[in-house]
Image (cartoon, rainbow, N blue to C red):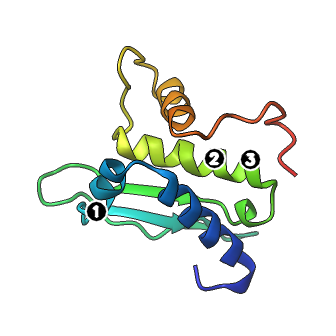
Amino acid sequence: MNDPEVEPLRQRVLYVLNQLPDSVQRDFLDDLHFRVSLDEFEPGKGRTVLMPTLNPSGYESRCVVLKPRLASCREDFAFYIIAHELAHAYLRNGGWGNITDREEAADALAAHWGFLRPNSIFRPW
């Protein structure tokens, strides 16, 4: 994420990461297969996302893929999406507590971390 146009996204990701509990940050930092990648889309060519393949123990990578438009959308929306995607990575795309639905679990954990789903989620700009 060295492109000046997506630098705000880098700052937003760092902000969200810094708000997470130390144990969650440590979980990400200690996992060599955790990555945050940029979804690069070229009209007519499709998407390019660089992510690691299966790790040596056979588990999938823990790669969070974010769209560049999160650099310019509303801040509360971007923070929520980033936290939601990080929650998926932390939960390894599973449930949380009694919540078995992956999307509901990621929403609940993101909210637990202080990143609530914005009321006007369908108007991110």
Q: Which residue is mark 2?
A: 81
Looking at marks 1 and 3 on the same chain, the residue that comes earlier in the sequence is marked by 1
- Residue 116 percent location from the top left of the image: 65, 35
Q: How many marks?
A: 3
Q: Nearer the viewer, residue 107 or 19?
A: 19
Against 93, residue 57 (above or below) is below
Quadrant for the N terminus in the image:
bottom right
State which mark lies toward you, 1 or 3. Answer: 3
The location of residue 71, given as percent across then percent down, is 73, 66
Query: Mark 3 — residue?
Result: 77
Place of residue 68 in the rendered image (x, y in percent of width and height, measured from the top left): 69, 66
Mark 1 vs mark 2, foreground winner is 2
Marks 3/2 in contact by CB < 8 Å: the verdict is yes
Which type of secondary structure does the marked residue at label 1 adopt? loop
Instruction: Please state which amino acid type lies under the numbered disc 1.
Output: His
In the rendered image, which quarter is residue 97 located in?
Answer: top left
Distance between mark 1 and mark 2 Cα atoms? 21 Å
User: How busy is the neighbourhood of tag 3: few (under 14 within 10 Å), some, or many (20 plus)?
Assistant: many
Residue 61 appears in view? no
Q: Is residue 104 above or below residue 76?
A: above
Task: Say left or right for 12 vs 108.
Answer: right
Secondary structure beneath disc 3? helix
Q: Amino acid type of disc 2? A: Ile
